Image (cartoon, coloured by chain):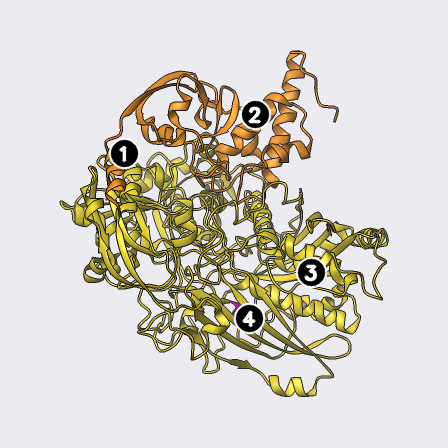
């Protein structure tokens, strides 16, 4: 349940913020979604992959004769061919020499890396044939431990690159050393965020067809990726206008990772080479092992300098991130946290040293929050440690550091202005909603009864509005300073409204978003507004739904286009009513003279004039009724200063998590008994969608905190390639949750909205970790590594309580 | 690669096709498939009923759930030939013949009990099976019924809300129609 009370400004909204049914849901509940795997082309061929069993090896030979002899096998392709006819895939940082192709070229760099692709009449046949491809390997030294990988003696993952470190820089924002020297108290701690990911239930699927007549490569893919058509075309050495990505396929979840660029380049190449439609749908093992979609895997060393009251004077964070065997965009996941590096706290100076290192593991891809959730976990753990060190309550210590409601816009040391917020109000709401005092009594009683019980609290930010400033910050050769989004709105002759968006949707309800904001501006019923996804050759510029940006950016673009339509309607009315625009009023699509309501042109009449009666159109106005709007990210456009300060994202949502859990001493099983999230993402356009994503984000956070890990053996083998060993929380592990809303509108956006697509996940793991360590505190032990598995808990739960703790029950 | 293995694979490539006849959503449908074809592949690829989804192919995620003779099964863990002669209900068969959504489907829309929609067919099948045997499920019973279906979007909250709402509506309708099905106590 949720307590939704949006305290809007003076102007009430008609549709924004109201409970309305989602446009997309009916097709999904009736089995009429259309996902990439549902697209069926006649003569379609299927791909299966040959994967490396070694974490590092030279490919000596590939013998595909037996595979090709199988009836129904069309082709077997290996990396050498792709290296000849395609260009290497995009690298997010300046790391020449770290080249990745869809299939391994000469050497394999992780167990599971794709070595050859088999194309056959059916997937089953392709799998049969893949088993017959005989690859001879010459194993090479490898490195699995990121702390070894950074050393000069470590085997290099890429012999063509001078070390395993893709990116490293020490940013110093303010007089950090001086603050540490002067502070009466300090602490240092090391925490580790485990290698997990978003793992959507739909694996990545892509289908490509080359049309020789038009020389266009058509692509249907379960994609959520900025610049995907462009990167595909470049890698395939095609002009951008020869690749048509169909964004009207439904995507079965992504939360960041659906970026199958290597899959798409492979399938695009095969489709063109063979002259037949070719499809690749990952099976679950391919997805988890060779799908290149694992998430951040970080070791944080955090140091705080603070006074006796627990007011933080300075912070140092060193983050070592194991990105696996190739680069892609993964190093940039250390960059986004620069925009919220001090969390919601008034920390005057910060040192941040991100280090992105390669190992012989499956590569990393963008995951919900783009590196912010691990960073939040590290900061929150340090805040808890400080509270414990000083003997001050964890909530009180946060209150002493939270940025005040009257301090916005607030400039943090790394150069980002936080737009707005009322952190303490949200904290208070969450505590009240959770019944915090009662939870404390309950915990203390449980402890007195000999049980392990803990309360967790986290106060975290969700930067939103998806900019790409980390690109220019981490790669001086990349001058990307715009991350625009666009929309086109048109009113047809019948008076119906169609809005066009320019990317695919993976569950965020963008059709609902766009129809709601267009309906709001034009005062027309959103349920009657159609929203279509343009293909990439019809599309206006888009940067896809990353970085919690679509409510802000697509919402703003659609509203901007609708406003232009509205202005055109007003101009047509003014011309025909012989009355200046200032004296007219727009009411539900009709326009009338404010002082004389009988002088009015209805929506239908205005549309008719625009489409048919050019003689009644004002001079200079285009006939028809359509408008587009391309919106740059508010606050965007800047380059970093020499010391690495830059405005990262424009908007900053805030969340407080309050968790109560108990740990079974006999099994180590934690049970979350109360979960409350106080959430402020400004004005919610569709509260049901916001709440749904927040609940889902919390569940995802529960997974990251307690269950999910892509574990690797010391010899470099993935140990969690199925859902029997990579544990996604079910309805049993995820408790009933409660959200309490607060609304601090953003001054930067159309309706005051902020982003929410990463909500829940950004603070959930920190809060759960806080609760676990609170529960373990009487045993004078703690866990500093996610996931906090049952086994790790069990080992600690067996410890005897400390002298200051509570009596052992048995 | 051994010659024997190659022979086995060539044999498989020329494998015999079997005629499979199923009652799907009330209508008899038939098609040909290899013995090793899973039920979900047969439904999706042969009968082109793409409402049922493939998530893991090892029986954990539940996205491929269908009803076999009224009981939920994983269609990825079953061969199509095993379902020969049986009755199957897929998500496409939950709405009325005229396309009107069932109370359960409508309740999922009412509470927004889904996001990307990929796990939804399996969730609906699991919930339908629950409500057919238990019209007044507790929250635990609801969570238990969908405990074998993974969802990555929702955190299950609005799914649980949807199933609870559907139960209440079905009970209210039953009471209103005087059909003798007892209404929930609260």
Chain designation of label 3: A
| Residue sitting nearer the eye, A310 or A345 | A310
The image position of residue B55, as x and y in percent, is 44, 40
Residue A626 appears at what percent x and percent y? 34, 47
Give the side of residue A734 with respect to residue A335, left or right: right
The residue that label 3 is drawn on is A770
- How many discs appear? 4
Between the residue at mark 1 and the residue at mark 3, the CA separation in whole angstroms equals 55 Å
Q: Residue B94 placed where, x, y %?
A: 49, 24
| Region rendered in magenta | A337-341
Residue identifier under label 2:
B129
How far apart marks 4 and 1 lie (CA) works out to 64 Å
The rendered magenta stretch, by its main secondary structure, is classed as helix
Q: CA distance from mark 4 to mark 2?
A: 52 Å
Answer with mark 1 or mark 2, whichever residue precedes in sequence: 1
For mark 4, what is the residue? A417
Residue under the point 63% across and 52% down:
A8
Please tell me the colour of chain A.
yellow
Report which colour depicts chain B.
orange
Q: Which residue is mark 1?
A: B12
Please say whether residue A338 is one of the residues in the magenta stretch.
yes
């Amino acid at each position: 349940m949720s307590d939704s009370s949006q305290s809007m400004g003076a102007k009430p909204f008609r549709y924004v913020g109201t409970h309305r049914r989602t446009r997309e849901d009916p097709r999904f509940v009736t089995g009429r979604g259309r996902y990439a795997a549902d697209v069926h082309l006649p003569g379609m061929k299927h791909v299966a992959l040959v994967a490396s069993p070694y974490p590092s090896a030279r490919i000596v030979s590939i013998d595909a004769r037996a595979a090709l002899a199988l009836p129904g096998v069309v082709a077997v392709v290996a990396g050498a061919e792709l290296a000849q006819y395609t260009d290497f895939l995009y690298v997010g940082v300046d790391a020449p020499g770290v080249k990745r192709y869809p299939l391994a070229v000469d050497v394999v760099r992780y167990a599971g890396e794709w070595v050859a692709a088999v194309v056959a009449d059916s997937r089953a046949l392709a799998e049969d044939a893949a088993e017959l491809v005989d690859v001879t390997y010459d194993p090479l030294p490898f490195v699995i431990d990121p702390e070894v990988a950074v050393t000069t003696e470590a085997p290099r993952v890429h012999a063509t690159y001078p070390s395993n470190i893709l990116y490293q820089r020490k940013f110093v924002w303010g007089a950090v050393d001086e603050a540490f020297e002067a502070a009466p108290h300090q602490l240092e701690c090391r925490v580790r965020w485990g290698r997990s990911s978003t793992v959507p239930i739909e694996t990545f699927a892509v289908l490509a067809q080359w049309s020789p007549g038009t020389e266009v490569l058509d692509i249907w893919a379960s994609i959520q990726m900025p610049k995907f058509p462009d990167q595909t075309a470049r890698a395939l050495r095609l002009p951008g206008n020869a690749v048509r990505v169909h964004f009207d396929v439904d995507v079965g979840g992504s939360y960041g990772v659906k970026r199958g660029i290597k899959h798409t380049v492979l399938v695009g190449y095969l489709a063109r080479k063979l002259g037949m439609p070719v499809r690749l749908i990952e099976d679950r093992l391919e997805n988890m092992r060779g799908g290149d979609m694992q998430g951040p895997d970080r070791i944080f060393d955090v140091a705080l300098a603070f006074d006796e009251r627990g007011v933080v004077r300075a912070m140092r964070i060193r983050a070592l991130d194991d990105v696996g065997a190739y680069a892609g965009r993964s190093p940039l996941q250390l960059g986004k946290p620069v925009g919220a590096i001090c969390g919601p706290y008034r920390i005057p100076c910060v040192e941040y040293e991100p280090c992105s290192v390669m190992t012989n593991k499956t590569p990393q891809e963008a995951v919900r929050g783009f590196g912010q959730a691990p960073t939040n976990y590290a900061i929150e753990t340090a805040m808890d440690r400080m509270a414990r060190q000083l003997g001050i309550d964890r909530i009180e210590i946060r209150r002493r550091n939270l940025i005040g409601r009257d301090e916005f816009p607030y400039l943090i040391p790394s150069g980002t202005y936080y737009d707005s917020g009322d952190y303490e109000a949200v904290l208070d709401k969450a505590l009240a909603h959770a019944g915090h005092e009662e939870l404390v009594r309950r915990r203390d009683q449980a402890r007195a009864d000999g049980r392990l019980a803990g309360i967790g609290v986290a106060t975290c930010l969700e930067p939103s509005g998806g900019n790409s400033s980390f690109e220019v910050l981490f790669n001086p050769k990349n001058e990307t300073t715009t991350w625009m989004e666009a929309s086109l709105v048109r009113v047809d002759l019948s008076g119906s409204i169609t809005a066009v968006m320019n990317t695919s949707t993976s569950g965020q309800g963008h059709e609902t978003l766009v129809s709601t904001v267009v309906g709001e501006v034009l005062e027309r019923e959103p349920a009657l507004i159609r929203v279509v996804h343009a293909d990439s050759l019809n599309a206006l510029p888009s940067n896809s739904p990353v970085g919690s940006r679509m409510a802000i950016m697509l919402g703003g673009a659609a509203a901007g286009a609708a406003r232009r339509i509205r202005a055109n309607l007003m101009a047509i009315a003014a011309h025909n009513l012989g009355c200046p625009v200032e004296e007219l009023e727009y009411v539900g699509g009709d326009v009338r003279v404010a002082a004389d309501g009988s002088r009015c042109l209805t929506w239908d009449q205005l549309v008719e004039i625009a489409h048919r009666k050019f003689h009644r159109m004002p001079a200079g106005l285009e006939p028809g009724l359509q408008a587009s709007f391309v919106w740059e990210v508010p606050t965007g456009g800047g380059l970093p200063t020499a010391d690495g300060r830059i405005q990262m994202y424009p908007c900053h949502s805030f969340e407080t998590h309050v968790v109560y859990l108990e740990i079974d001493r006999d099994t180590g099983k934690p049970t979350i008994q109360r979960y409350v999230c106080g959430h402020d993402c400004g004005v919610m356009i569709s509260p049901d969608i916001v709440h749904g994503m927040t609940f889902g984000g919390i569940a995802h956070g529960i997974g990251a905190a307690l269950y999910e890990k892509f574990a690797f053996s010391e010899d470099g083998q993935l140990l969690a390639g199925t859902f029997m060993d990579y544990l996604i929380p079910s309805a049993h592990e995820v408790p009933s949750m409660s959200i309490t809303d607060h609304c601090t509108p953003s001054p930067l956006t159309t309706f005051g909205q902020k982003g929410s697509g990463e909500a829940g996940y950004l603070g959930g793991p920190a809060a759960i970790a806080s609760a676990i360590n609170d529960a373990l505190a009487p045993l004078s032990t703690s866990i500093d590594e996610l996931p906090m598995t049952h086994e790790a808990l069990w080992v600690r739960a067996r410890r005897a309580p400390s002298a200051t703790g509570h009596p052992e029950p048995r | 690669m051994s010659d024997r293995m190659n022979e086995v694979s060539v044999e498989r490539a020329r494998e015999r096709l079997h005629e499979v006849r199923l009652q799907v959503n009330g209508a008899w449908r038939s098609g040909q498939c290899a013995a090793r074809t899973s039920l979900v592949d047969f439904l999706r690829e042969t009968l082109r009923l793409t409402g049922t989804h493939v998530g893991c192919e090892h029986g954990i995620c539940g996205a491929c759930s269908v009803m076999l003779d009224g009981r939920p099964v994983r269609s990825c863990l079953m061969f199509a030939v095993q379902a020969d002669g049986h009755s199957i209900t897929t998500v496409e068969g939950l709405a009325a013949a005229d396309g009107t959504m069932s109370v359960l489907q409508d309740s999922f829309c009412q509470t927004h009990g889904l996001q990307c929609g990929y796990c939804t067919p399996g969730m609906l099948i699991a919930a339908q099976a629950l409500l057919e045997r238990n019209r007044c499920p507790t929250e635990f019973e609801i969570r238990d019924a969908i405990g074998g279906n993974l969802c990555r979007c929702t955190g299950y909250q609005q799914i649980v809300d949807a199933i609870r709402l559907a139960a209440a509506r079905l009970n209210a309708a039953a009471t209103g129609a005087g059909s003798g099905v007892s209404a929930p106590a609260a």
